[in-house]
Amino acid sequence: MARKPQSRGKCQYCGEETAKGGMTKHLVKCEKRAQAIQTADAGKKPEETIWHVRVQDAYGKDFWLDIEMRGSATLEKLDAYLRAIWLECCGHLSKFTVGGWSGYDVGKSRRADDVFAEEIALLHLYDFGTTSETEIQVVGSRQGKATTKHPIALMARNNMPEKACQECGKPAAYLCMECLIEGDEEGDWFLCEEHAEDHPHTEYGEPVALVNSPRLGMCGYEGPAEPPY
Ligand SMILES: [Zn+2]
Ligand SMILES: [Zn+2]
Ligand SMILES: [Zn+2]
Ligand SMILES: [Zn+2]
């Protein structure tokens, strides 16, 4: 079997695309990012530790983000960010843990500096029924100033995974919840524009437009999967 090509993503500073495994290296040498940091460091914001964090879905590794988080920011801010860009469907409960369900909880009021000094890997759980599990991994840190006025800055994001229509193999734009829940074949729930139109299933509503989030197809999630700032 051919190996699945590695997920690719885009640097938010310069627009360059790299494989998931090459993005950390790119961010270190990205000139546009270096300029943004230089400009920030010349400004009036307080200097602090800025954490580089890789976020990825625990089961869909094609969904990943590289973010910078201010050391003074609380996990509450990270929770809000994850909800906005990937997770929010109906205001479910969420928590940060070390070790998941069998591990221990890390309070959302704690600051990145305190938490990441002790733990470099957290698991975020959203919705305690149909749970989305998100891995939070510290990649590194820098001393300096934040490049935006926000607690979190998006540095890189995965490109939307390409899916093929189950009918014709053309690029898919929708998924059918009924095929996903009741179908037998793994992955046979994606549809192109044309085949979404005459698809017969309505048990769980019309086909859902694909968005760049690992929560699509879980609970009532429909996007928009946009960063909050
Ligand atoms: Zn770049
Ligand atoms: Zn929900
Ligand atoms: Zn099709
Ligand atoms: Zn269907």
Image (spheres, rainbow, N blue to C red):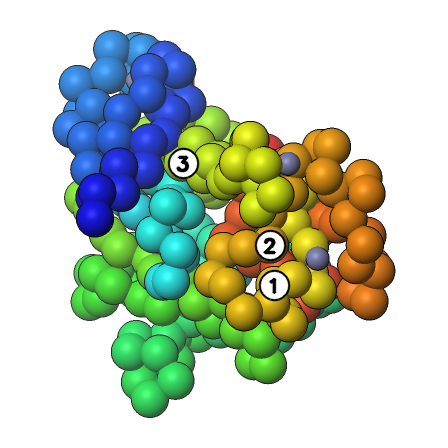
Q: Which residue is mark 1?
A: 180
Judged by depth in the image, the label closer to the viewer, 2 or 3, is 2
Which of marks 3 and 1 precedes in the sequence?
3
Which quarter holds ligand 4? bottom right
Is the residue under label 1 in contact with that under label 2 (CB below 8 Å)?
A: yes
Count of numbered circles on the image? 3
Type of the residue with mark 2: Trp
> Which secondary structure, mark 3?
strand
Q: Residue at x 60, y 67 (%)?
A: 183
Residue neighbourhood size for the residue with mark 3, other residues' Cα within 10 Å, grouped as few (<14), some (14–19), many (≥20): many
Q: Which residue is mark 2?
A: 189
- Quarter holding the C terminus? top right
- Please provide percent x and percent y for residue 73: 43, 51
Q: Is residue 71 visible?
A: no
Which of marks 1 and 2 precedes in the sequence?
1
Q: Which residue is mark 3?
A: 158
* Quarter residue 152 falls in: top left
Type of the residue with mark 1: Leu
Callout 2: CB less than 8 Å from ligand 4 = yes
Above-or-below relation of 56 to 95: above
Q: Residue at x 54, y 69 (%)?
A: 184
Q: Is residue 53 left or right of residue 105?
A: left
Callout 1: CB less than 8 Å from ligand 4 = yes
- Please provide percent x and percent y for residue 8: 33, 31
